[in-house]
Structures are given as C-alpha cells and as structure tokens.
Image (cartoon, coloured by chain):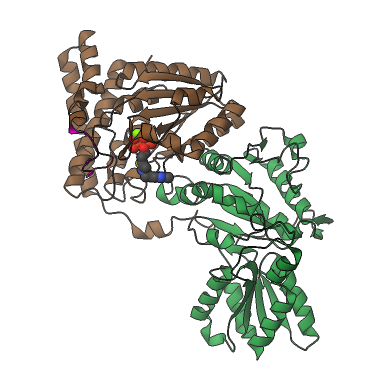
Chain colours: A green, B brown
C-alpha cells in the first residue's frame, strides 16, 4: 500500500503497462525530457527510452492520427493531449478515424489506443484551458470515456484503458492531480463501465464523476448534520456508464441528483436523467435535478470562476429540493 | 524490378473493376458516392508493386485502385461496394472505406488528408518494432491544403520515419483547379522540410514503379521520408454522376492520349510481347471482375445484427 498523488498513480499505471507490454508506447508534447506539463510522465523517458516515450511537435491532429495508425498496425499507443481544450484540433482523428475503424472495416481490426487528457477548472486557466468536453465524446459510438476521481481509480482504470481493445479517452481532472490517496501494491482490476458507491446513504442518490464526486461527498457530510443521508455514486466511466448501478441506487433512495463540473446543458447528466426517467420512473419520488456549470465559457477571474463552478453547497441545495 | 506484365495486369484489373462499378452505379446496384480513379491506375499499380506484405498503405476517397493493387480480393471488394454481408467490411464501409487490414491496407478514407497521419502512425509502428516495414500515404493535389499534411510531413521529417507520401496530381480538387487552392508547389513545399521530392509521369507505370522502388529502398535503409509526385489524369467526374459543368469538354476529350494502360500495352508490344498474351490478360481481368460481381449479386445483404454488435470488441466472457 502506498499513498500516491493522482498524478503519481497515473505515472505508475503507465510505467507498469509499459514494463509488461512492449507494444505500449507514449506520445505527446513535452512528455519525455520535460516529464509532461503536469508531471504525469516524469521519469519514463529514462526508463523506457525515446522510442517509447516520444516527444512530439505541437501537432494534435498528427499525434492522434498517428496513434490511430500505430494502433491499427498492432501497437498500443497512449497519446497525451496537454489540455482537453486542445482535442478540438484532433477531433477528426478521434471521431472519424479511431471511433469508426472497427465498425466501418467490418471488425477486421480495432484501435487499441488511449488518449489521456486533463479537463476542468479551478486554476484560473481561463476559457481555453479549463473546459470539460467529455459529453462530446460520449456521444460518439466507438469511443469509451473514463474519468476517475481518486488515485486508486486513476491507476486501475488507466490500466484497464490501456488493456482495452477499443479507443478510450482517459480524462484526468487537473484540480485532482495533487490529491493523495492509497493505491495498493497489486490492486484488483477495475473494469470500465462499473460505478462505485463513494458514500452510502438511503435518502437520495447523487451521481457524480471527476471533481464533482468530492463536492458531492462534502455535500453529503453537510446534509448528514441535517438528518439527510445522501448516497454518492462515483460513475468512473462515462461511456459506457453503469446504468444498472444508478437504477439500483435510485430504487433504494427514490431521489436523484446528478452533479458534474461540465456545462449542465446537453451534458452527461442530461443523458442519465433521461434514461432514469425512462427506466426508473416508477422509483422516483421527486424531480431529477442536475447540478452543473452555467451556459457560459469558463471565466478567468477567481471571483468569476468560483461563481461559475458547481460546488458542495449547490449539490446540497439540490438534494434538499428533491426531498421537498 | 517489377514485372511490366504484372503491372499491366494490375492496371487492367483496376480499370475493369472501376468501369464495371460505373455501370453498376448507373444501374442502381451500387448506392452512395463513388469516386473512380480511371486514368490514374498507373500510380496505384506502380507504387504498390514496390511494397512487400509487411508494408502499410493509407488511402484516400479515391481508393479502389490502392486497395486492389494492395491485393484486396475482388470478391470482398465488390461485395463491399455493393453493400453485401460478404463485403470485406461487412457492407458497413462501402466505396470510401474499402480496407484490407491483413494486407496492410489501412483503408480508403472519406476525410481528405486524414490518411496521412494514419500512415505516419504505421511508419512509427514499423520503426518502434524495429522492422524494415514502410508506410505509404496516397494523397491528392487538393489535399495539400489540409493542415494534417503539414503536420505529417513535419513529424516524419524530424523523426526520419519510413513514410512515402505519394501525390496523385490530377490537377483537380473536386470541382476546382487545385492551383487555385494551393499556393505551394509540392516540390518546394517538400524540400522546405528537408525531404526529397521526385516527380514522375503517372501515366508511365514502369517509371512509377521504378521511382517507388528507389524510394522504398531508401526508406528501408532508414534514410527518412520521401515524397513522390505522380502527374496523372482524372478521366471521369469527381464522383459518378458529376455533370462536370466546371470542366472544359475538350480537356475531357483528350484524356485517352494519356492512357497508362494503352501506353503500357504499346511498350510491351514494342518489347516483343505477343498480342495474344496481352489480349488474354485483358479478358482474364474482365472475367475475374465479372465473376466477383456475379458472386456479390447472389450474396445476402449487409447484416444489421452484426453491425449493431460491431461497434466495440465483444466483451470477454
Ligand atoms: C475534410 C474534407 N473536406 C472536404 C471533403 C470533400 N472532398 C472530397 S474529395 C475532395 C477533393 C480532393 O481533391 P484531391 O485531394 O486532389 O483528390 P482527388 O479527388 O483529385 O483524387 C473534396 C473537397 C472531404 N471529403 N473531406
Ligand atoms: Mg486532385
């Protein structure tokens, strides 16, 4: 058992996967000698050499396109896109190539690649370095999307993503990189698509992912003082997402709140709300409520950004409302 | 050296297949959009003759010739374009996505310029594995306006990857002359990356094969990427059914002067190949195409249940 920061857990998962499987290699901007903008690849160049830890030019379309070509040719690339905002430049490779290849080539071959990228705000990084764009990707048949909330899950899910035969977008929350948590020496694998109860409760279910898991847990602690037991379900995987686990929790609590850092409109929460209205309607004793960011870009100023970001207070208020 | 008769045969196969597709399309037996490479067969046949089974090819929207020259079987090819379950892609890709991964044919591509970074990745895979495999990216002269082309050549150059970029310069980018769209001359563009550029007459299949063989040998020696520009002619519309109002009918009328197949036949005849050998090659190509079409016609239509479960790898039991 070791206490690791989230970014170290990512690093360990990469190192383990590379040591086990010579077909795994990394590519991205300043991931080699510089160790990555957030340090996720620190030390890996020395361990594995420049062919397997490849520093690339500032060419997001080329990086992800090359990852697709390498994956179709039998390697397992793990590409890093420095900020999730920059996937806009790589969308063709991701959406039209990686996501489609298995299907449109009739299953001849898949694209076993991982795209690691950090999302989220809280760092005053402004409108082009803070976005949570995961809903775009969840909308694309052929992609898988994962977003861990703890170091242990970051480690286990990155291992699962690298082992996966299909393209996985692995989203790391920037504000959680420094968060510490226990990671076992030989942890049990965590399959993609399985949620986790982060905090049990019987009065309301709060479904969350990424940083919102921690806000929801904080909200649940506040609500406990008011005699409300909120269950926090950490989705961990967004595509596929654990519909059965959400329905099961809802069947016990009969109230549902969905919290996310991303813009609320047309988001992951909207899909979960719609599905639960379809298959869990009879279980609902209150309205399904969403807590997400307002329909604006992420602002730079600290005051503006803290007004923008969802937090524990807003989640707690939503839980109270759904219990009214 | 590639066998000139084999080159001739491959061009015939591509020509027969595509002229048959034009008829099938007109008769409604082929749905969707198809882009034919009639007149450009010398490039596909010549370049692919320089490759071995370990090599990789990423293609374009005009990719039938590349797929067939890579060895994709006519049966799987026609069944695919005719939307049958026996298509090599199960009828889910069609003309713009014909692919044969077993043969290192990484797919035609509906996105202009997108094949280049994929070929770059294949070249990276060959390098990382330490094999002497090479990757080829076919692209059109119009595609040079796409940013991905620049990113690809830049990365291939800094990493000295075994990537051969082959420009099929037919003068057209869809309905526009490509010189109204691309300011750079390909040679100057290539050389500004420190990469060697060779120009070749795409209607001379033997010359294309020789240029490709020389480039591929250099790639296998680890000398870094190369660009070959093959001047060629698109005989037909951008896609089948294109009324080509933008095109001078006189230009279209002159196409046959550049016919790579007629030229190859004349050269073979001059070298003493008996007419009967050449005639037999022609009728064999026609018969093989006819047999593949007949098989595709009787094949079951594309399978919806298989498509639904074909998005992701099957879950492990
Ligand atoms: C990204 C993208 N933009 C536009 C198109 C539409 N389109 C298909 S082919 C083509 C022209 C390509 O010209 P060129 O690369 O010279 O190839 P050619 O058709 O001459 O073989 C265009 C604009 C497309 N398929 N993809
Ligand atoms: Mg062209």
Is A236 drawn above or below residue B87 in the view shown?
below
Above or below, comparing residue B214 to residue A66 in the picture: above
Left or right side of B158 for A4 = right
* Residue drawn 31% across the image and 47% down it: B86
Judge left or right: residue A171 versus residue B213: right
Q: Position of residue B136 (x, y in %)?
A: 46, 29
Q: Is residue A84 left or right of residue A179?
A: left
Report the image quarter containing ligand 2. top left
Q: Is residue A214 magenta?
A: no
Count numbered badges in the picture: 0
Looking at the image, residue A310 lies above or below residue B301: below
In the depicted view, which residue is nearer to us: A285 or A137?
A137
Expressed as whole percent of the image width and height from the top left, the position of residue A160 reads: 64, 54
Q: Toward the viewer: B168 or A141? A: B168
Residue A110 left/right relative to B99: right
Q: Tell me which corner region of the image, top left, top right, bottom left or bottom right, holds residue B41.
A: top left
Residue B96 percent coordinates (x, y): 35, 44
- Residue in view at x 69 percent, y 45 percent: A17
Q: Which residues are magenta?
A: B238-249
A304, B108: nearer the viewer:
A304
User: Main structural element of the magenta stretch: helix, strand or loop?
Assistant: loop
Q: Is residue A138 visible?
A: yes
Can the viewer see residue B105? no
**Quadrant the C terminus of chain B occupies:** bottom right
User: Seen from this angle, which residue lies furthest bottom?
Assistant: A324
Name the residue at 30% across, 28% down: B40
**Quadrant of the frame with the N terminus of chain B:** top left
């Amino acid at each position: 058992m070791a206490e690791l920061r989230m970014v170290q857990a990512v690093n360990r998962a990469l190192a383990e996967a590379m040591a086990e499987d010579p077909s795994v290699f990394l590519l991205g901007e300043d991931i080699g000698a510089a160790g990555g903008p957030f340090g996720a690849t620190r030390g890996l160049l020395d361990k594995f050499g420049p062919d397997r830890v490849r520093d690339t030019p500032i060419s997001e379309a080329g990086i992800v396109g090359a990852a697709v070509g390498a994956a179709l040719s039998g390697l397992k690339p793990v590409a890093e896109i420095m900020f999730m905002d920059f996937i806009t430049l790589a969308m063709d490779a991701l959406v039209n190539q990686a996501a489609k290849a298995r299907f449109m080539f009739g299953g001849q071959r898949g694209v076993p690649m991982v795209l690691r990228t950090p999302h989220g705000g809280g760092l005053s990084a402004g409108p082009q370095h803070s976005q949570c764009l995961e809903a775009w990707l969840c909308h694309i048949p052929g992609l898988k999307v994962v977003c861990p909330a703890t170091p242990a899950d970051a480690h286990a899910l990155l291992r699962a993503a690298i082992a996966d035969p299909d393209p996985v977008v692995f989203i790391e929350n920037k504000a959680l990189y420094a968060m510490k948590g226990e990671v076992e020496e030989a942890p049990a694998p965590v399959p993609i698509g399985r949620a986790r109860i982060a905090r049990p409760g019987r009065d309301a279910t709060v479904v969350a992912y990424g940083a919102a898991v921690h806000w929801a847990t904080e909200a649940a602690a506040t609500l406990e003082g008011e005699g409300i037991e909120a269950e926090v379900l950490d989705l961990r995987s967004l595509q596929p997402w654990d519909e059965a686990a959400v329905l099961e929790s809802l069947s016990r609590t009969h109230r549902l709140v969905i919290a996310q850092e991303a813009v609320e409109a047309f988001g992951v929460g909207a899909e979960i709300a719609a599905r639960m209205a379809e298959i869990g309607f009879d279980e609902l004793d209150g309205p399904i409520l969403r807590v997400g960011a307002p329909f604006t870009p992420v602002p730079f100023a600290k005051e503006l950004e803290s007004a923008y970001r969802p937090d524990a207070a807003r989640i707690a208020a939503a839980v109270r409302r759904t219990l009214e | 050296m590639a066998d000139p008769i084999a080159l001739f045969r491959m061009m015939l196969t591509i020509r027969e297949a595509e002229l048959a597709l034009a008829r099938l399309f007109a008769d409604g037996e082929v749905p969707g959009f198809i882009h034919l490479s009639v007149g450009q067969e010398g490039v596909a046949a010549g370049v692919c003759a320089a490759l071995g089974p370990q090599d990789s090819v990423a293609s374009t929207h005009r990719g039938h010739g590349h797929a067939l020259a890579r060895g994709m079987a006519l049966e799987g090819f026609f069944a695919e374009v005719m939307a049958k379950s026996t298509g090599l892609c199960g009828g889910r890709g069609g003309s713009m996505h014909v692919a044969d991964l077993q043969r290192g044919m990484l797919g035609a591509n509906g996105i202009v310029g997108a094949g280049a970074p994929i070929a770059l990745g294949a070249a990276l895979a060959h390098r990382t594995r330490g094999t002497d495999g090479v990757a080829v990216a076919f692209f059109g002269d119009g595609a040079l306006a796409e940013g991905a082309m620049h990113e690809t050549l830049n990365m291939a150059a800094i990493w000295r990857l075994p990537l051969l970029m082959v420009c099929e310069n037919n003068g057209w980018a869809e309905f526009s002359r490509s010189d109204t769209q691309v300011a750079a001359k390909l040679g100057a563009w290539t050389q500004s990356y420190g990469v060697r550029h060779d120009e070749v007459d795409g209607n001379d299949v033997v010359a294309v094969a020789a240029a490709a063989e020389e480039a591929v040998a250099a790639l296998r020696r680890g000398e870094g990427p190369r660009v070959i520009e093959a001047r060629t002619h698109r005989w037909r519309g951008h896609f089948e059914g294109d009324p080509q109002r933008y095109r001078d009918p006189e230009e279209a009328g002159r196409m046959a002067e550049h016919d790579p197949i007629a030229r190859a036949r004349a050269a073979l005849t001059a070298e003493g190949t008996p007419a009967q050998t050449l005639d037999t090659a022609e009728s064999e190509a026609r018969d093989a195409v006819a047999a593949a079409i007949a098989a595709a016609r009787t094949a079951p239509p594309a399978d919806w249940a298989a498509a639904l479960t074909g998005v992701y790898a099957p879950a492990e039991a």
